[in-house]
Amino acid sequence: MPRVHGPKDGHILTAKFNGKDAQNLKGIHGIQSLVLLSIRGKEHCAGEYLGAIIERALAGPTKPDPLSADKLYNAKTKKRQSKSDEESEKDNASEMDTQSKEFTTFLVADKVSWHNLKPMTADLAADEKAELERQALALGDDYLQENLTQFLLPFHLSIHEFERLYELVRNTPGEEANNVLNKLNLTTEQFTALRQAIKPEYSPIDAKIAVINQLAIEKGKHFKIVRWEEWINSDPDFVENQQELIECYKQDALKSKIEEDAQDFAKRHKKEGGFDLWLHRSRGYLTEESPAVIWLSAKKGINCIIYPGEKLACFQATADFFITHPSDPAKPLQIQVDKPELLVNWLDAYFTRSYSREQLKQRFDMLMGDSDPTSIDSPIESEEQATSFSVKRSYHSFFSPDEKRKFQSLSKHKPTGILPDIVIRPLSNGGMEAEDAQMSAVKKEVEILLAKIMSLREPEMQKQAFNLVETALEKAAFQLENNPDSPEISDATHFSHKV
């Protein structure tokens, strides 16, 4: 399944989280999420993809689609109409409280990446391991700095605005402080909290992350950026038992899955240093990562883990091994909960590109411009895009299945009779006296129609919409060609279903 859908030149990128585990979270409120971020080798964990993940995660990882949301809203509205004002206020307060309990942790897997830097040596000296960990942390610094802009999206802050705020927080604020605070809608107390979030021992990038995390608290954004070392040291039980947890991976139920995933990773990266090297690295990486991600997340009550990739077999095995029901036989280090299915559900991140309003307008202007409409190429260029946005029909289709798709002249078409319940009737002039004003209105309506069709998520729905429009235009063209003076088509044309 493609990781990214939609036109490659679309300016708008959105994320959606899917997976068979998602069904376990239906109807669950106050979801606790962990977004796992790889610092190298995973483009969908960085840049605009990261930005899309952040925005989607904070909107709610299992947020219903717009249609479901509308139905839910209508149902709630009807229910509240039968309630007193006092009861309605209690419902509103309850919903806000539920939303406030949702929280997202963005875990930057930096220090653990030292495994991906180590040589084939079986045993490393302590100082050699420390040096590799230092290099991994430096890569983590670079990752965070390069993606700082994405973590500012929830605040609608530019990197320039944040850097200005950060300098004020780090240094003694001058006269310009009030202007900046007013612009960012920060109180003096909030500014003081930002200053106190920075510890003397912090590196520059850690200080910036601390400011962002504190800003999230002050603005009620319910998320936190956490680096690997902070994560594994955040729970005393994990700190105490980490080595014992790792020893469990010598048991076949866990070891076999580590080997399975390590072999798969090594095959995919063998050209970057050899199969044996990456097998060696992956075994160590996955053995350290699995309990830190799955066991510790379950211990913290994390409901879902979000990542742009499939769930590893060793992650599933870890969950099955350690997360149990109270009625199950006791095991060392197990986490017993009444509903194990509510913990560490895996959500795979997928992305959709779409055209911005400006892009739609440009394409609309091309279609409605002075150039010959028979020579305008369709915006669909790749086969993947064609699958999503074009309608493959017979030889006379406006959206031709040929490699170069052309918009053909309307007058060449005869009605196909696909939708016989479509009729044409005149629109009122609505006070418009000039034809150019009418044309402007028509262009606006077409632009809105294109935007609505492009916004449909399902390709089948897009095809139905294009079929509907094409059939109506064919009928209009046929009527215009055979009866050009008909008063029914002298004005802008309106399509409607028969009553």
Image (tube, helix red, strand yellow):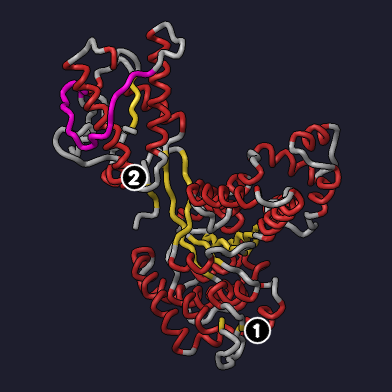
In the image: residue 145, left or right of residue 186: left
> What residue is shown with label 2?
461
Q: Is residue 442 above or below residue 82?
A: above
The residue located at (65%, 60%) in the rendering is 103
In the image: residue 365, left or right of residue 119: left
Q: Is residue 138 magenta?
A: no
The residue located at (61%, 56%) in the rendering is 141
Q: Is residue 152 above or below residue 319?
A: above
- x and y, in percent, of residue 241 in the image: 65, 84
Dot label at residue 435: none
Q: Residues within 10 Å of mark 1 (few under 14, many from 20)?
A: few
- Image quarter of residue 376: top left
- Whether residue 50 is visible: no
Residue at the extreme left: 395
Dot label at residue 241: 1
In this orientation, which residue lies closer to the viewer: 271 or 436?
436
- x and y, in percent, of residue 126 in the image: 61, 77
Q: Residues within 10 Å of mark 2 (few under 14, many from 20)?
A: few
Q: Is residue 94 above or below residue 431?
A: below
- x and y, in percent, of residue 347 in the image: 49, 63
- Amino acid of disc 2: Met
Identify the mark nearer the N-term, 2 or 1. 1
